[in-house]
Amino acid sequence: MKNTVAGTVDHSSRPKASLFARLKDQWDLQLLGLPGIILIIIFSYLPMYGLIMAFQEYHMGDFPGISQWVGLKQFQYLIKDKALFTALRNTLVISALKLSIGFVCPIIFAVFLNELRSPKVKKTVQTVSYLPHFISWTVCAMLMMDFLSVDNGAFNELLVKLHITSTPIPFFQNGKYFWGMALLTDIWKELGWNSIIYISAMAGVDSEMYEAADIDGATRVQKIWYITVMAIKPTIILLFIMSVGGILNTNFDQIMMLTKNMGNAMLKENADVIDTYIYRYGLGQFRVSFATAAGLVKAVINFALLLGANKIADVAGENALF
């Protein structure tokens, strides 16, 4: 059917191709996505079968599903374990610090880079900020231990020489400093890497908007807030929702390395988190069913938080995940 006004063909009346026909026409694109789909199935969906161990008394060597069924027995043990609440407290505190301070720092850093006028300086700062991300937590922990050491540690020597403290601070001998160390080391290592997505979003802002703001007499701070920040607001909201959904996920590698595989008894009270709790019971004590129950509870809570954060964003009229 021809459109009498525009003189173009109207395709709206054409029947839609079947799903099979579309897959056949796009076979090359489907082939590109096939390896990713296979990996997701193998490493994300097939292991979900093992969740039934949370309702069994699993013994090493048993095939999942044939062990004795015990119902909610593992969950009852979990609720009665006092160590769980200590791990939950530490997890929530560390995650809250990272979700508030640690989440905002990459945004501020990205805005700072966007405001730099010299391309060479900007590229140099970006490169330097990315480097710590590619260093393993094993190496990072060793550097931190040397840097914050009571014996000739550079940071402690600086504090003493500046008369900020009279004696070196035992960062790795006192648990009250661990939450701060977990936050600061995470920011130092991931600041540049986490800012990449914000820098990319800022690159899509039309330069004419800044020119129009200059004509209207907007200050630099006003341009940052009303143009730059507002342009990346959808990205910020989406990443924040995903961060809320993983609030019970702490950086397992970071915690293990900073505490020497939880061997530092002086830090355990403030460093033991849900992930290390599951690791300790699952692999350390071979209580696989108990550890599976703890992991299942953690996953359910994270999923509920993700749905809640997404719903709040949707009701507020912001960009939601779904």
Image (spheres, helix red, strand yellow):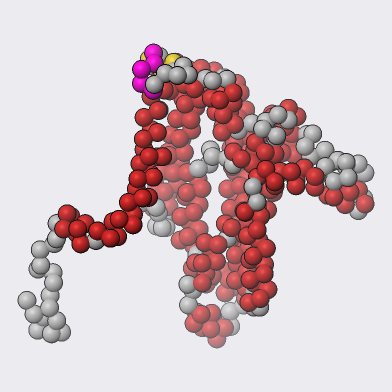
Give above or below for 126 relative to 53.
Answer: below
Would residue 42 be counted in the magenta stretch?
A: no
* Viewer-closest of 154 and 103: 154
Which residue is depicted at the point 51% across and 17% down?
Answer: 77
Which residue is depicted at the point 38% across and 44% down?
Answer: 40
Q: Main secondary structure of the magenta part?
A: loop
Would residue 67 be counted in the magenta stretch?
A: yes
Q: Quadrant of residue 261?
A: top right
Give above or below for 83 relative to 126.
Answer: above
Q: Quadrant of residue 61?
A: top left
The answer to whether residue 205 is left or right of residue 102 is left
* Viewer-closest of 209 and 300: 300
Which residue is depicted at the point 38% across and 33% down?
Answer: 48
Which residue is depicted at the point 70% across and 46% down?
Answer: 139
Q: Position of residue 28 (x, y in %)?
A: 28, 60
Quadrant placement of the N terminus? bottom left
The answer to whether residue 208 is left or right of residue 135 is left
Q: Position of residue 183 (x, y in %)?
A: 66, 46
Give above or below for 275 relative to 191.
Answer: above
The answer to whether residue 74 is left or right of residue 158 is left
Q: Which residues are magenta?
A: 64-68
The answer to whether residue 70 is left or right of residue 168 is left
Residue 312 visible in this rendered orientation of the protein: yes
Give above or below for 266 relative to 120.
Answer: above
Q: Position of residue 265 (x, y in %)?
A: 73, 27
Q: Position of residue 311 (x, y in %)?
A: 39, 47
